[in-house]
Each structure stands twice: as structure tokens, then as C-alpha cells.
Image (cartoon, helix red, strand yellow):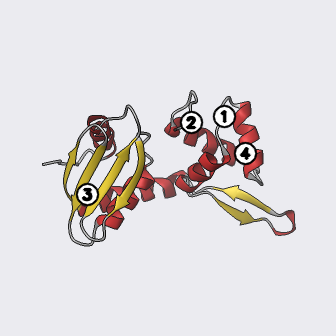
Amino acid sequence: MGEQNDTTRRERLRIILKLLREHRVESQDELLSLLEQKGVYITQATLSRDLKLLKASKVGAGSEGYFYAVPSDDELRKREEIYAQDFLRGYVSIDWNDQMVVIKTYSGHSAPVALALDNMGLDGVMGTLAGQDNNVFIALRAGYTGDAFMADLKSRLPDLDED
């Protein structure tokens, strides 16, 4: 089951980003402690996924060791534009129900479309599975429907035409 807390993934990612930019964070334990001070209680596994979504990485500071760093807002915006382009360039059609979304893609585009969706970090997406060639399956979290997925996707991709 998913974790219960008062913040959505998007809010949590904003908090983590702010903490990483304001503090020299050397470990995930230190970051978990900072998050708890902000009232955000998550597991180390969730934090690892969040850091991956933020493209955070440890960078060296010479003799002072390593700390987490994140790309600039401009770099993140550019990456989001690339994800949007990859998705829009690769998908053919989208079909959904209350538990699952199936995206048909052009041949060879299933992996880039799935990766784009993973990197968008939509709260209701439990996971994606790219077929070998032209299908992407998306498992939805309990209570998050295909209609909600489509609304979130359209808010991220205004040029999306689901026909």
C-alpha cells in the first residue's frame, strides 16, 4: 500500500528541492530529518524515488566530502519540455478504465513514452510498463481513475489530442 501523509508527491518534491537548495545535505538520513521538521514523513525508499525524479545526485566538494545537488529550474524546465516532446511524438492513442491506462505508441516509441510518464511524476501513477515495441501499460493507484489520469496528463500536456 502507498504511504499516507498530508503532502502530495508534487508538494513533497517542491519541499525536497527547496531543502536541497538551502542546505548542504550529505545523506538521505539527514534529508529525512529535515523533511520531518517540515511535517513530511516518508520512508527512505520513497525519498530515493523522489531524489531520482528530481534528478538529484551527489557531487563532490573536494576534501569536504559529497552532498546532494539538483539541476537548476531552467534545466528542469528544459527536461520537462523534452519529456513532453517525447510523449507527444511517440503516442498514437490512449485508452483507460478505473485501474489501468493503455497507450499505443508508434513502433519503437514505447520506452521513451513510458520514461516520459515516469519522469512527469504524476501522483496517481503506481508504475509504467513499456512493451517491447508499441504499448505502454500504466497501473493506477487505488482511488485514482483513468479519467483523473487523463485530466492530470492534459494539464501537463496542453497539446495532447487523445483521439
| Structural crowding at the residue carrying mark 4, measured as other residues with C-alpha within 10 Å and reported as few (<14), some (14–19) or many (≥20) | many
> Residues under labels 4 and 2: Cα distance?
18 Å
**Disc 3 from disc 2: Cα separation:** 31 Å
The residue that label 3 is drawn on is 88
User: How far apart are the alpha carbons under marks 3 and 1?
Assistant: 35 Å
The percent coordinates of residue 113 (x first, y second) are 32, 60
Q: Which amino acid type corresponds to the residue marked 3 in the rendered image?
A: Leu
Q: Secondary structure at mark 1?
A: loop
Q: Residue at x 24, y 55 (%)?
A: 103
**Residue closer to the observer: 101 or 108:** 101
Residue at image position (69%, 31%) is: 38
Q: How many marks?
A: 4
As drawn, the label of residue 31 is: 4
Foreground: disc 4 or disc 2: 2
> Which numbered dot is residue 33?
none
Q: Give the residue pinned by disc 1.
A: 41
The kind of residue tagged 4 is Leu
Q: Amino acid at mark 2?
A: Glu
- Which element carries disc 4, helix, strand or loop? helix
Label 1 with label 2: CB-CB less than 8 Å: yes
Which mark sits nearer the N-terminus, 4 or 3? 4
What type is the residue that disc 1 sits on? Tyr
Q: Are marks 3 and 1 in contact (CB under 8 Å)?
A: no
Q: Which mark is residue 3?
A: 2
Q: Which quarter of the figure has residue 42?
A: top right
| Mark pair 1, 2: CA separation | 9 Å
Q: Secondary structure at mark 2?
A: loop
Where is residue 50 shown, x and y percent of the image? 57, 49
Q: CA distance from mark 1 to mark 4?
A: 11 Å
